[in-house]
Image: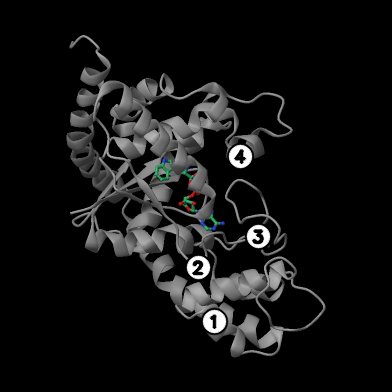
Amino acid sequence: MERVFSGVQSSGAPHVGNYFGAFRQWVADQHTADSVFCVVDLHALTVETDPAQVRGRTLETASWLFASGLDPDVCIVFAQSHVHEHTGLSWLLECTATFGELRRMTQFKEKSKGNESVSAGLFTYPVLMAADILLYDTNKVPVGDDQRQHLELARDLAIRFNGRYGETFVVPEAVVPTLAARVMDLQHPERKMSKSVTSPLGTIDLLDEPDAIVQKIRKAVTDTDGEVRYDPEHKPGLSNLIELFAAASRRSIEDVTASYDRYGPLKADLAETLVEVLNPVRKRYVEITADPGEVPRLLEKGAAKASAIASKTLLRARRAIGLLAP
Ligand code: AMP
Ligand code: TRP
């Protein structure tokens, strides 16, 4: 069976971009592939964090994964920092990656822009991500569009390591959804919806109540030409809504576009569809988090299963590179 692996940062409340761009695909994958999903809490430390919030955010993010439908009896869900092999392999891969290729990563350039002090971890972030993926002999990595370049790096590192030290890693492939791979901010449709940029009206969080969803969609920025047409370049706001609608209702962009000739009704129906799809997820979240012991227990079980796989791969990599066995 194919191995699927993916990860999500515990850097804040997940939003509809995470859900339609990633989580929903993961929920489907767990039934067709040998699937492993990780809350990447170490990646979340690459920017300044408040220690009082770190744990809670890991649990919150994991809870959203379970609420979205990941079943701990069907797939593996765990926290990255619980499986030490991730940082162990990351070092071997840091010595495989070059400064030049990491400097070219657009996410690093974006996140470091304008900051006086940038952590070395933010720079080597994509190498830890490659370690996450390669530890599990991953074939497919379902991610949003923003992760394509990081996946290319993971492939390059696997190929380079295999070439230098002998066949060690499976070379992974990115799987990016055809719809909602890059959900844009509702107020600033030129930038992606993000957990790290504060934009309360521009972001629909999975925890948002129906009223908030309706209001945010109603206030979403569009344009003044009034024609319902999918044209991301000239009509980014409206096109984002059309694409979100198509993803949420599992219809095609053409079908959604043909059904409306005014923005108002399209927005109203989109809001209704989002509420319908997200309501059960939010309800499950409330249920799961009602018992504070539940998610830590599930993550502990997940980590034990993940470690069993990861430790074998790290041993293989350590041997290949010639390290003395302990
Ligand atoms: P992150 O929250 O950055 O850890 O992202 C978790 C997953 O959600 C990754 O697969 C991302 O590519 C995906 N993702 C994040 N933001 C968006 C967005 N605005 N639209 C679509 N997918 C996204
Ligand atoms: N960098 C990814 C993001 O920001 C999260 C991530 C870390 C990841 N490790 C991963 C995604 C491994 C897929 C596979 O979304």
Q: Earlier in the sequence, mark 2 or mark 1?
A: 2
Q: Is residue 99 left or right of residue 152?
A: right
Q: Name the kind of residue labelled 4 in the image.
A: Thr
Residue for badge 3: 185
Q: Earlier in the sequence, mark 4 or mark 3?
A: 4
User: Residue at coordinates 58% horizontally, 63% vertically from top-left?
Assistant: 204
Up-down relation of residue 166 to residue 257 (above or below) = above
Q: Name the kind of residue labelled 3 in the image.
A: Asp
- Residue 163 position, x and y percent, is 32, 27
As drawn, the label of residue 179 is 2
Residue for badge 1: 272
Q: Name the kind of residue labelled 1 in the image.
A: Glu
Q: Is residue 125 left or right of residue 165?
A: right
Mark 4 vs mark 3: in front:
4
What is the secondary structure assignment of the residue under circle 4?
helix
Up-down relation of residue 275 to residue 143 (above or below) = below
Task: Work out how far the residue at label 2 is from the one at label 4, CA to CA, in angstroms.
Answer: 22 Å
Report whether the residue tagged 1 is closer than 8 Å to ligand 1: no
Q: Earlier in the sequence, mark 1 or mark 3?
A: 3
Task: Work out how far the residue at label 2 is from the one at label 3, CA to CA, in angstroms.
Answer: 16 Å
User: Residue at coordinates 54% horizontally, 65% vertically from top-left?
Assistant: 208
Mark 1: few, some, or many residues within 10 Å (few <14, many ≥20)?
some
Q: Quadrant of the C terminus?
A: top left
Task: Work out how far the residue at label 4 is from the one at label 1, CA to CA, in angstroms.
Answer: 35 Å
Residue for badge 4: 106
Q: Earlier in the sequence, mark 4 or mark 1?
A: 4
Q: Nearer the viewer, residue 307 or 149?
A: 149
What is the secondary structure assignment of the residue under circle 2?
loop
Q: Earlier in the sequence, mark 2 or mark 4?
A: 4
Q: Quadrant of the N terminus?
A: bottom left
Mark 3: few, some, or many residues within 10 Å (few <14, many ≥20)?
many
